[in-house]
Image (cartoon, grey):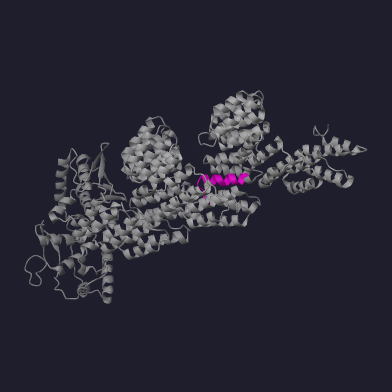
Amino acid sequence: MYSKFGNVGCAQYVFDEMPQRNEASWSTAIAGYVRVGLYEEALWLFIEMWGGEGIWPNGYMLASLITACCRSEEMVCQGIQIHGLVVKIGWLSDVFVSSALLHFYGNHGFMPNAGKFFDEMSERNVVSWTSLMVGYSNYGCLEEVVEIYGRMRREGVKCNSNSFATIISACGSLEDELLGSQVLAHVLVCGFMGNVSVANALIFMFGSCGNVDDAYYVFHRMDERDIISWNSLISACSHNQLCEESLQCFRWMRHCNEKPNSTTLSSLISACTNVDELKWGKGVHGAVVKHGLDSVCVCNTLVTMYSASGKCREAELLFQEMPEKDLISWNSMMSGYVQNGDCQISLQVFAELLKTSKFRNHVSFATALAACSCPEALIEGKSVHALILRGEFHDNLLLGNALITMYGKCGAMKEAEQVFSMMPAHDGITWNALIGGYMEKEEPDKVVSTFKLMRDSSISLNYITMVNVLGSFSSPCELQNFGKPVHGYLVQAGFESDSYVQNSLLTMYAKCGDLYSSNFLFDRLVNKSVVSWNAMIAANSHLGRGEDALKLFVEMHQSGLELDQFSLTVSLAASAGLGFLEEGQQIHSLIIKLGFESDLDIANAVMDMYGKCGEMDDVLQMVPESGNRSRLIWNTLISVYSRHGYFEKAKETFHQMLEQGPKPDHVTFVALLSACNHGGLVDEGLSYFSSMTSEFKIPPGIEHCVCMIDLLGRSGRLAEAEKFIAEMPVPPNDLVWRSLLSACRTHNNLDLGKKAAEHLLEVDPSDDSAYVLLSNICAVNGRWEDVNHIRTQMKSIKLKKKPACSWVKVNNKVSTFGIGDKSHPQSIQIYTKLKDLMNMIRQSGYVPDTTFALHDTDEEQKEHNLWNHSEKLALAFALLNTPKGSKIKVFKNLRVCGDCHSVYKYVSLAVHREIVLRDPYRFHHFREGKCSCLDYWLGATEAPHTSQPWPAARVASPLTGAASLRLRPGDFPSRVRGLGFGVTPTGVGATTQNNAIIKELMGLREKYENLSSYVYNQHKQGQQGGDGHTCTCQPQNGNSSNKCGMKCKLIDWVVAIDHNALIWRTQANMRTIEQALGESISWPKQHVFIPNT
């Protein structure tokens, strides 16, 4: 009696006063100790009975002792010893003893032993079956629970309330509503619907499957409720993010005088993880403190709530103030930092855990690996991997999957493959992680081969597999070879109805350029979700159809669907791609109205939109203080500075980030290297690339390599670029070869250009840029037969060059122009304006650069073709339709041509207006005859001497006031290309001695900064006559005409602008030229152009 009511003291007193004790006395006393949790005392009492009194135990006593060992974590060894005693004295056949042993092994996680023991049991009852089910459920093997339930039904074993509660809970955890409904029918037949435990399990199951209404229905029909009933209902609401419903249940619970416990508050706090519900979560936090329910469990949930809401500072303070922390506390804090992008801090918490606690589990290591899932943290990831191998978790399946995921996101697929091969077992997550790694590495061949291996194995495919595979294809060739066959397979396998797979199909076809198929699939969708709309908006934006993307966004908004962060981000990207500032501002206003302005990704997208629309001031206004900037903001700021020509500011921002901000990542260096690329900062770019790998331990990705190839190629160092490709740590893709081919076009290197084009076509045979760029190189070199052959090839495979297109927005209306476009209502006025502009800038010294006219026609036709370019038409239209003195913004879908760039400079000076031209690579700001790019993009052989977009001292021509133009290597005959213009010296004078001469001329060029290509162009026109200029050179070599020979041209090319006249007088420089040519020259005393005006 005393022991049943928990009065152990009285029970012990009565037991000690007994004059004679028998087997029943000892059994009752031991069971009493077990009942009140005095497990060690129960064991000592048994030892006293067995060793001192010599009384043999009975089945009830042994079952009580095994139960004590089951409940105590410190008595596992004693439980195994009692199992041995049970076998020795012959009590193993007793169903109660064997059921207790089964429960002991299952409770301590020895499920293989438990399963084997169960199969060897001579007699089983419902308790035995239920113990095995509970063991597998606690161990996380829910499929085994379902299988055991099926065996019970087949063998005719009647379930009890615990059996039903266990299988229903397993259905809830598996979110298998169909099986749960079948079990519910069995419950109704057996009459257990009124059982509290079964009803609680049903509430949990319906909540886990998203059927909160059914959970309420079960709750309302319960005749009796306990605290678990209320907690289950609150948890069901919380699981489905129904914060208000959770709070209403809590108020109802208090109204019914049911006292909440830690589980109640934990479930309630879990419902308040969104930013909007954080105020309710803080209120619950106050109630926790007020009623003293701040247990470790509740505090852990509060840490998770603050972390999930982006309030890591509050989570950290709570974590530090916790008087007691368990392993879940540490794991929650680490996970919170990872979710908010603070991976370095998460690793610091993990290091602190290793120092202060000897306890850590597989979740701790998995979270640490998640913090290392970026290229710059690869070394830390390998260190965590080493710790796993040293510990007891080296065979853990979850950690094996986490390792493959980590290595895949770091681009280290060799290491991922090694982990995969060493794992003792694989599941679907393992295969999906490996396929996802290949997808991140852009290796579609390996994705497909791994997918085939997975399909041939016994592992079932799921929607994640299909999403990863479909996301690996991004070109028409890959679509034809891989994408369409995979599409056929997933239809056959029954995945076509899955919403995630449907959206992935939309994206795949769009990425591969087949927007027609994307639209077809989208129109066939019965229920278009937010994700479906987002996929189509992103697809149109990605393919350059920004207007269609914005129309879809408006339709989506009008349809009543709730916009999410991705909807707003992709619509901002569409506005940015088009340069539509007004539409971008409207979306920004909508973002503020919806309360998304604090979202980091959206804030970054807004900044990017303003930057791509040319509004640098708006970007800077949005940038927070340096101490509050995320890595994403720093990266965007560097990128915007680079795009607008503020190369020094980009570098300063990077160094400021090193001092005050987070550690740079691979995206940071892409932005930084792009800045060096656009600014021609070759040596600095090489230095940053080297420090990225050596100092910051970031392995170079394909984006970094493309930047370096473009940097070297544009500066004329083509041999170094080719060597860089051969030594790249990643296999070259189409971007690499296209970049090299573009550099060959800039520097007219036909041989290397052919090699690059061949490699590019091997990667993607349908790439039109390979044919177009190679054709341009041949055209510049006068290889017209080759040009015709290339164009014939393009026609034979039905490949068309991407047409150039420019647009300008005036009075909230977009006007678009193609080459030679006459479809515009104002086309007559536009072409008249172009003619006026041509005459105007010719008087200022403009000479058409016909090397950019890539057709085999006469000079006059080439000039005519140049003035049909789309950016010139857009400029003329803007000048006709905008107020005088206002800024003009023109956008183009391809890189601006060199002649149009020159025209824009002359026009900006002639009309005294700022003109902004944006192409896919950068902004060109034209003011008073100068461009922010410093003409480097034309392929200058060395970096500009200043990387500021508006240099204070830019040398101007004394004849016109216009800025002098920088010479290109293609402007020089082969005879004089050895004079230090970045071309290998050939012909006369190409000797060792000539290197010193070249160096001297380079120094001269550096001294004056700008060579007078202006003089050369004017002189060239003077030879052809009719340009209004007169050459004052004395006739040479018997030439009495006004047409000068090569020697006179050479002087024009190397003459430097010096104050008010173009004068060459230095005798030393004259001798240098003579030595370079290998012959003497009859030099004039003064060489100057005098305008007739």
Relative image position of residue 43 (x, y in whole percent)? 80, 44
Residue 255, picture quadrant:
top right
Which residue is at 34% across, 62% downward? 721
- Any part of residue 1025 in sight: yes
- Any part of residue 662 in sight: no
863 in the magenta segment: no
Question: Closer to the camera, 542 or 979?
Answer: 542
Question: Closer to the camera, 535 or 708?
Answer: 535
Relative image position of residue 115 (x, y in whole percent)? 67, 44
Residue 257, picture quadrant:
top right
> Image check: 1021 left or right of 750?
left
Magenta stretch prevailing secondary structure: helix
- Name the residue at the right extreme: 19
> Image check: 1093 left or right of 138?
left
State the extent of the magenta-drawn residues as a range: 328-344
Which residue is at 59% across, 40% downward? 143
Question: Closer to the camera, 904 or 698?
Answer: 698
Question: Closer to the camera, 116 or 208?
Answer: 116
Which residue is at 68% across, 37% downward? 130
Number of dots carrying numbers: 0
Residue 26, picture quadrant:
top right
- In the rendered image, the quadrant that contains the N terminus is top right
Task: Tell me if residue 896 comes above or below residue 1081 in the rendering.
Answer: above
Which residue is at 44% across, 61% downward? 691
- In the rendered image, the quadrant that contains the C terminus is bottom left
Task: Tell me if residue 494 comes above or below residue 1074 in the rendering.
Answer: above
Task: Tell me if residue 27 comes above or below residue 846 in the rendering.
Answer: above
Relative image position of residue 817 (x, y in whole percent)? 22, 43
> Image check: 8 left or right of 472?
right
> Image check: 263 left or right of 83?
left
340 in the magenta segment: yes
Relative image position of residue 1016 (x, y in whole percent)? 17, 62
